[in-house]
Image (cartoon, rainbow, N blue to C red):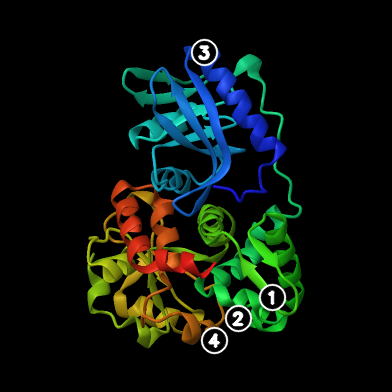
Amino acid sequence: MNNMNHETGTEQEILNRAIQAVEREAGVRLHKQKMAVQVEGLWIDAILQLEPGEQTFIAEVKKWAQHANLGALIHQIQQLPETGLLVADYINPKMAVKLREQGVQFIDTFGNAYIDQPPVYVYVTGNRQNGLRPEWTVGKTGTNRAFEPTGLKVIYAFLCEPRLVNAPYREIAETAGVALGTVGWVINGLKAAKLLIDKGKKRGRQLTNYRKLLDRWVEAWPEKLRPKQLVGEFIADEPYWWKTIEIGEFGGYWGGEVAAAKYTDYLKPKVVTLYLPEQRRAALLREARLGRAIDPAEAGAATVLIYQPFWPEAFNALYIKDKGLVHPILVYADLIATGDPRNMETARRLYDEHIAGRIGQD
């Protein structure tokens, strides 16, 4: 879902090649009706019409899709306001199986495809012409640099409080817990991506596509920032130990499935995710009788993942409204990263109840 001016040559090339490939491999024709338009308030890459029939798809174009967070990718397509179609540079066989299991239809530039729109049914996988790799690569300048680990901290602060984008650079840096110099290149990167506009001193800066920015952050979070914050994986003797712990006494915050269960009263947690500062960590491990998970076979219903918070202490009082729970945006990202259908459904509920209202703040 791109802004109207973000129709890059690379994405246009991916779309054109994928349309040609699915016609060549399966005899299915897709016609471009509109490019970079708004549907129900969201910017989308393209609207395609399937021939035969009158079925239309909302196309989400992804370059370097095989390196994407698959859970986030599936969620983005499933959340489109009409029937979605993932258009990618390349979908490998393992991805194809997972996408099909989740009902996500796709085409790629090598002719791999899954389309299920009776009377049209196509499932092609394993194509990799002459062993070639796609010609496009992902650089780390401009747009991409904003989505590197330090930049993700700033973007998280903007997502939690969109009005912060118009604050002085020093205030942004202190809120996000980054160096002052970081703020400038993040803002420049977001402007290059058409996700932020600067209207000058009188009207200030403003996010232009909150939903797209959220999707990008959710996709990058488990790959770029979360691994750096991992303290370790632990196991508990008692699977429901977290129900009797007052996490605030240890300066910690529930994330993932436990936080989702508390926000939505819908999910029965299997994995406990905890954001815990170092100061009281040893005390919690003793109190909850948590031990390091050395053998992966030990992990299961009693798995506990502990992370170091990436935001400064002052952020908690300003933007975390529910005591002992991380912000809904981080819970949403944790759930989607799992790729688990039950967590994806809970993420949709969480989005509707706690996040969707923020789109109007663009």
If you read the primary sequence from the N terminus, does the residue marked by circle 4 or circle 1 appear first? 1
If you read the primary sequence from the N terminus, does the residue marked by circle 1 or circle 2 appear first? 2
Q: Is residue 306 visible?
A: no
Q: How far apart in space, not on screen, are marks 1 and 2 (Cα)?
A: 19 Å
- Report x, y in % for residue 40: 44, 51
Q: Secondary structure at mark 4?
A: helix
Q: Identify the mark at residue 204; answer none if there is no mark.
A: 1
Label 2 with label 4: CB-CB less than 8 Å: yes
Q: Secondary structure at mark 1?
A: loop
Q: Identify the residue shown where x is 55% and y is 58%.
A: 217
Q: Amino acid at mark 4?
A: Ala
Closer to the eye: label 2 or 3 = 3
Look at the picture and state if 62 lies above or below 40.
Answer: above
Closer to the eye: label 1 or 2 = 1
- Report x, y in % for residue 149: 63, 62
If you read the primary sequence from the N terminus, does the residue marked by circle 4 or circle 3 appear first? 3
Q: Give the residue pinned by disc 3.
A: 25
Q: Is residue 318 left or right of residue 17?
A: left
Q: Give the residue pinned by disc 4.
A: 314
Q: Secondary structure at mark 2?
A: helix
